[in-house]
Image (cartoon, rainbow, N blue to C red):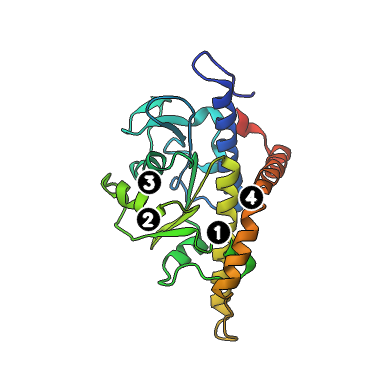
Amino acid sequence: MLIAQSETMSKTEVELRQELAAAYRLAAMLGWEDTLYTHFSMRLPGDGEPRFLINPFGYMFDEICASDLIVVDMNGQVIEGNADYNPAGFTIHSAVHMAREDAHCVIHTHTLSGMAVAACENGLLNLNQISTEFHKRVGYHAYEGVAFNLEERERIQASLGQNIALILRNHGLLSVGETVADAFQIMYYLNKACEIQLAAGQMASLSPISTIPDHLADYVSSQFKKVEHERHLVWKAWLRKLDRMDASYKD
């Protein structure tokens, strides 16, 4: 049964809920989940103080439906929904939504490969074509402990800047996008770049690692920018795949 539009819920909000719920289900399928932790959020349109959708604390990614998502304001008040949220997730996601009006969707993960690269002093290296999409487009944020301190929001905002992604050192990965499609695809390839780096590091004892020179990485990064519209085609393909497997995320 699909989530129904109500007097208080617009057609746009229903669609955003379904897309964000789909992102959670796909993340579970890809092995990105960390039990109840890490979060994806989506800013809701409208005038006034920003509000965003986020997962209710206590749900695994593979059981989240559109109707389960709660609405939170920038002060941490639950506006819609009958559940609470993870305070650390609120700190990180509200920080981005407060500072970047273009970052409607925010995705944060704790994958093995992402955390491994986040622990590397040199961060993400230009080891492969996939990595070059993030050349000069990823920020770094120093670890400050579990993000319970709201004062950290300003520092997260400064670390992200105008980048499409953020590596939270000794912690994990974060991507931002104008749509769920953008943020999801950015995270997919950021995580893939980290997987490549982790695999290359495991082979370093057998053969020296070759990196792509900065001037060439600049060029390839500019090529990627010209085809960013293709993210929406890939997202539609992801949704078709998910619908074939289990369309209950729309409920």
Image point 49% across, 28% down: which residue? 45
Q: Are marks 3 and 2 in contact (CB under 8 Å)?
A: no
* One can see residue 127 in this view: no
The residue depicted at 68 percent of the width and 48 percent of the height is: 230
N-term mark: 4 or 3: 3
Residue under label 1, please give it: 191
Check disc 3 and report the residue beneath it.
92
The Cα–Cα distance between marks 1 and 4, rounded to whole angstroms, is 17 Å
* Label 2 crowd bin: few (<14), some (14–19), many (20+), radius 10 Å: some
Q: Residues within 10 Å of mark 4 (few under 14, many from 20)?
A: few
Residue 119 numbered mark, or none: none
Q: Quadrant of residue 84?
A: top left
User: Is 233 on the left-hand or right-hand side of 158?
Assistant: right
Q: Which residue bears the numbered disc 4?
A: 228
Q: Which residue is mark 2?
A: 159
Mark 4 residue type: Glu
Depth check: 37 or 96 in front? 96
> Separation of disc 3 and disc 1 at Cα?
19 Å
Inspect the image, locate mark 2, and give the three-letter code of the amino acid beneath it: Ser
Q: Amino acid at mark 3?
A: Ile
Q: Quadrant of the N terminus?
A: top right
Q: Can the viewer see residue 13 in this picture? A: yes
N-terminal-most mark, 3 or 2 = 3
